[in-house]
Amino acid sequence: MITVEHIDFTYAQSSESAADEERLFRDLSLTFEPGHFVALLGGNGSGKSTLAKLLNGILQPLSGRIAVDGLYTDDSQAIWEIRKRVGLVFQDPSRQIVGAVVEDDIAFGLENLGLPRDEIVKRVNEVLKRLEIEDLRRAEPHYLSGGQKQRVALAGVLAMQPNYLVLDEPTAMLDPKGRRSVLSLVKSLQRDCGLGVIYITHHMDEAMSADRVVVLDKGTVVQDTCCPAELFSDWEAMNNMGLQLPPLCALACSLAQALPRGFAIENCSAERLASAIAAAVPCSPDNLTCSDVTPSAGASQESVISLEKVSYTYLNGTPFSSRACHNITLDVYKGEVLGVIGSTGSGKSTLLQLFNGLLRCESGRVTVCGCTIPSKGGTKELARVRAALGFLFQFSEQQLFETTVYDDVAFGPRNLRLPSEEVVRRVHHALQLVNLPESLWSRSPLTLSGGEKRRAALAGVLACEPQCLLLDEPTAGLDPGAAAELLGLLRRLHDEQGLTLVMISHSYEELAPLADRLAVLCHGCLLSAAPAADILYDDALLAQAGLEGSDISRLFAQLHSRGIALGMRPLGLEEAERCCKKILKL
């Protein structure tokens, strides 16, 4: 059992008064029992990741104690045994991958335990097979996608056969199908190995399968229940704490007055909700047409970025070579929002890095605003390309490095050798655009919350006034409120300033309503680039890509199979609600 006994914790601050104000945990007590699956929920800044690091002694409380099976984390003699028993997978898996080759990285912890070689080989083979990453055995972790890195980091922890597994947002960079696969894997590990699991997530649908749910808000436990359905009893309060209903549950709530009596919202699925809606539809419903779905605003046919038969292979010509993109032809049009989707390792991040010359294609041609990126050299051409394209990386907070927020945002304009007055104008404008209050401008960017860091990083990109913005999973790891705020900002930049956006996301409910088109990648190949509804309602195409539709598109596919809402293909929750209320005559 893990026991948290009346702990206080604060991150180091510059003064005692500041430390008191920033105290994260005050007299916190919790227990985690072996063999139980506990979902840990809460908004950004609620203390989830900090608690995870306290549980295996990476951090120490100011007061109080934490014990793992009777061993205290403040006992230097017991700390290595504790870390063997409590395996932790960080939110950013790159921070715990140290090996040059995947199988070496997995073996690293086992070697530190001094296990015999035969046992190490056996355990490495077992976890590679269990996590279905045997094909990555000889790959270099540095070149893997975010989702693949998460599996490698998990494999390294599982190989040590811990008693407890602490997972910090393990599905943040996975598509819906991949998320379910990881959750199923973790549940099987709990069942087969008797693991105690502490699972940090922002996805309520994942929490619903837990044995117990603990909700944190500002370092305090505000809900602790062995019945996850209880969270729905006071949803308004949960929403204020940064939690959000899964899309189908939210839709069911808005239609509750029309659905059959006793419909269980907490157990909502596409098939069950479709059946409930079908039972409530008035006799002989009209077969409604596509005009009932809000049309896309569209974009011009002027290309900002053009790829012609572009290919790229990591470590080409070596035994570790891995094809990331193959023969891709694609245009990004001025003023459009292009969403890029695909399963883990399909080449999405590589594609964005080819757009701005961070990677150079081995064949084909990349043209940005009329300037062709050379295969090598071309300093002037690259400068023009990177001035035109702003790039927000996965975990964009890692782009922050200056001593103050203001200086970080000013770094790009200063590098462009702009006059000081123009630098000031751009910095002020960018910080105001992302709604970062002036009180934060003089602070270190590293002291900001997760959502504030993302906005500060975005401000640094916007201050360079790019023509097109490339975004790689911009909402990964953000709570629903922070994600909605960031997406709203991107929509305003697009609608009001005509900024072209290219965005990778695994959250189709977030991406599809914003996108004019979706580009689908599979094993480095472009399968299709078409309007978002054409993609998400094409089951054959999605299956070919190893994907499946959003909750909303799967619900309406179920309705279509029942002869209801024909021609309606909503993409987001609001649009789905309008469509459902129309067919239900609400």
Image (cartoon, rainbow, N blue to C red):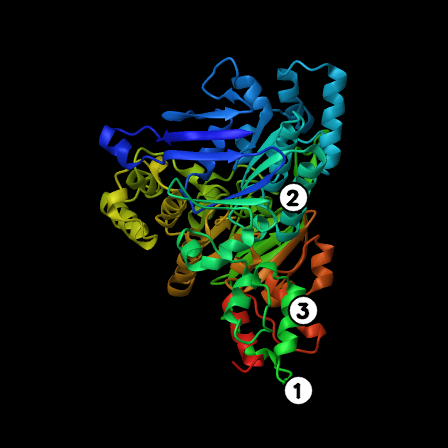
- Residue sitting at x 62%, y 67%: 273
The reply to whether the C-beta atoms of the residues labelled 3 and 2 are less than 8 Å apart is: no
Q: Nearer the viewer, residue 233 or 93?
A: 233
- Mark 3 or mark 1: name the one nearer the start of the chain: 1
Q: Residues within 10 Å of mark 3 (few under 14, many from 20)?
A: many
Residue 63 or residue 243, whichever sits in front: 63
In the picture of the structure, the residue carrying the numbered disc 2 is: 182
Decide: few, some or many residues near mark 2? Use Cα within 10 Å; few <14, some 14-19, many ≥20.
some
Q: Nearer the viewer, residue 263 or 381?
A: 263
What's under tag 1, amino acid-wise? Ser
Q: Would you say residue 565 is visible in this rendering?
A: no
Q: Circle 1: is it few (<14), some (14-19), or many (20+) Cα within 10 Å?
A: few
Residue drawn where x is 41% and y is 63% of the image? 498
Horizontal side of residue 15 vs 44, given as left or right? left
Which residue carries the number 1 mark? 284
Q: Residue at x 46, y 30 (%)?
A: 4
* Nearer the camera: disc 3 or disc 1: 1
Q: CA distance from mark 3 to mark 2?
A: 25 Å
Of pointers 3 and 2, the one earlier in the residue sequence = 2
Q: Earlier in the sequence, mark 1 or mark 2?
A: 2
Secondary element type, mark 1: loop
Residue 543 vertical position relative to residue 35 in the rendered view, above or below: below
Cα distance in 3D space between marks 1 and 2:
42 Å
State the image coordinates of residue 235 (x, y, percent, origin top left): 46, 58
**Secondary structure under badge 2?**
helix
Q: Which residue is mark 3?
A: 557
Residue 216: which numbered mark, if any? none
- How far apart marks 3 and 1 lie (CA) works out to 19 Å
282, above or below 370, in the image: below
SS of the residue under disc 3: helix
User: Which amino acid, by three-letter code, is at mark 2?
Assistant: Val
Which of the 4 quarters of the picture holds residue 234? bottom left
